[in-house]
Image (spheres, rainbow, N blue to C red):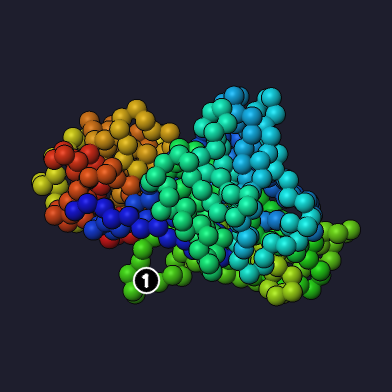
């Protein structure tokens, strides 16, 4: 069967974009988004904050009544300007000059940050022209209409940007796709208006159990906080799914510090959580003061030295080379769901070339072998490990119990063996 694509937007105090493809085996597919040609982007704001990592889609907390600056750069130095769209209940746009070294700045003044809604997420779109300076999507200065000069295929998308009652995040989706359909590129920022800042102290990888989350904040002493851990890897689940294995929560109260910086510390019971990478979200529980912050932590259950009985595998039905375990390879956390890619194109540890063999054994470790049986990677059996991205047109074959074969054009491009009961 071919895969079917769904796009899901989950709204917390922050916005996440997750693209999910459901297959007929355990797990799901999450294709990687296409990167733009403008990778160097950071954001700085009033109050202590950590600049966002370079990405083409960022969630930014914007402190009310404080200036907020986004720094960016272009790769093609013939580009002399970028266009910035702000979707905050209204649609506005401005042209920003690009410096001779390719850098530029987008600054939101205090009047703009003060007007950001606390009830929904606003969006900021940086549109890059086709070199040197051809903007294919513009806003009519007189009518405010969003128009396209690059491609007729973009017209239907851009027509929805001005839909009455649409959230800015929905308008952004149509605008972004319209910009790309007409030949330009764009970088997206989701802006979350906040009244105070919160920071989270770095958290090292740890075992599930009792997780201490602490940091500083400008919130007043006595302000209650919620602290939660949620799996980074969202995926479809059955009706009887037990969410306690991927979500956990706790509380904290702000205590007095020095100057404008107060403190907090709280504990989350993570003993039931599966191995995986988790978002840590700290948020104000005082409705009068909206503030939140996010970090990540890797939770890794201890790998057992004496695993129990595993799932039955009918090895006689598999055409495999001898799988040679390399004891010197220690398991690591996957960067994301598995992706099957052409040989020589891997850039992350979750990307495996055609012909690979993955064997998830009862010790909660999944080992990756080449087509001739040489181990090249070991990873923890994590939430991320339960998803898989396959090339367009690939077929899923689950006819052999506890084994998944991925086929493309009649050839097996991946064999995944699920000996670990956690893979059932």
Where is mark 1, residue-wise? 241
What residue sits 64% from the left and 34% below the top? 81
Tell which of 31 and 368 is nearer to you.
Answer: 31
Q: Is residue 176 left or right of residue 251?
A: left
As drawn, 193 above or below 153: below
Residue occupying image coordinates x 28% and y 55%: 4
Extreme front residue here?
142
- The residue that appears at 60% across and 28% down in the rendered structure is 79
Q: Which residue lies furthest to the left in this view?
A: 316
- Secondary structure of the residue carrying numbered label 1: loop
The percent position of residue 341, horizontal first and vertical second, equals 32, 36
Closer to the camera, 156 or 406? 156
Asked whether residue 181 appears in the rendered view, the answer is yes
Reply above or below: 408 against 25. above
Quarter of the rendering occupied by the C terminus: bottom left
186 and 419: which one is in front? 186
How many residues crowd around disc 1 within 10 Å: few (fewer than 14), some, or many (20 or more)? few
Location of residue 383 in the rendering, given as x and y in whole percent from the top left corner: 41, 56
Indicate the position of residue 271 as horizontal and vertical percent values: 51, 65
Q: In which quarter of the image is residue 368?
A: top left
Tell me: 220 left or right of 348.
Answer: right
Say whether residue 131 is left or right of residue 284. Answer: left
In-front residue for pair 375/97? 97
Q: Can residue 403 be seen in this view?
A: no
Residue 146 percent across, percent down from the top left: 54, 51
Q: How many labels does the image show?
A: 1
Q: In which quarter of the image is residue 118?
A: bottom right
> Where 22 sits versus 370, above or below?
below
């Amino acid at each position: 069967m071919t895969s079917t694509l769904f796009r899901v937007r989950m709204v917390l105090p922050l916005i996440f974009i997750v693209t999910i493809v459901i297959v007929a085996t355990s797990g799901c597919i999450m294709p990687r988004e296409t990167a733009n040609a403008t990778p160097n982007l950071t954001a700085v704001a009033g109050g202590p904050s950590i600049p966002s990592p370079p990405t083409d889609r960022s969630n930014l907390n914007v402190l009310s009544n404080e200036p907020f600056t986004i720094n960016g750069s272009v790769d093609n130095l013939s580009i002399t300007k970028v266009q910035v769209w702000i979707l905050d209940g209204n649609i506005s746009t401005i042209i920003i000059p690009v410096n001779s070294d390719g850098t530029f700045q987008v600054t939101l003044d205090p009047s703009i940050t003060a007007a950001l809604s606390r009830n929904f997420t606003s969006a900021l779109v940086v549109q890059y022209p086709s070199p040197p300076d051809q903007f294919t999507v513009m806003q009519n200065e007189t009518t405010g209409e969003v128009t396209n000069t690059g491609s007729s295929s973009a017209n239907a998308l851009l027509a929805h940007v001005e839909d009455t009652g649409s959230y800015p995040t929905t308008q952004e989706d149509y605008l972004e796709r319209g910009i790309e359909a007409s030949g330009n590129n764009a970088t997206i920022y989701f802006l979350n208006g906040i009244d105070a800042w919160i920071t989270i102290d770095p958290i090292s990888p740890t075992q599930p159990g009792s997780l201490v989350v602490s940091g500083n904040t400008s919130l007043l002493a006595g302000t209650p906080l919620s602290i939660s851990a949620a799996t980074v890897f969202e995926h479809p689940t059955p009706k009887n799914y037990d969410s306690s294995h991927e979500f956990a929560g706790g509380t904290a109260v702000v205590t007095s510090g020095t100057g404008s910086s107060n403190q907090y510390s709280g504990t989350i019971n993570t003993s039931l959580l599966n191995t995986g990478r988790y978002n840590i979200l700290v948020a104000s529980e005082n409705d009068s003061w909206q503030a939140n912050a996010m970090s990540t932590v890797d939770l890794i259950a201890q790998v057992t030295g004496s695993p129990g009985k595993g799932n039955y595998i009918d090895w006689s039905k598999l055409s495999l080379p001898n799988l040679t375990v390399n004891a010197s390879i220690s398991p690591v956390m996957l960067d994301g769901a598995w992706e099957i890619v052409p040989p020589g194109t891997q850039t992350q540890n979750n990307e495996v070339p055609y012909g690979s063999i993955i064997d998830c054994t009862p010790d909660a470790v999944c080992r990756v072998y080449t087509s001739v049986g040489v181990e090249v990677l070991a990873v923890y059996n994590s939430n991320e490990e339960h998803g898989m991205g396959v090339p367009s047109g690939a077929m899923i074959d689950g006819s052999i119990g506890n084994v998944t074969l991925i086929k493309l054009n009649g050839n097996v491009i991946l064999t995944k063996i699920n000996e670990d009961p956690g893979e059932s």
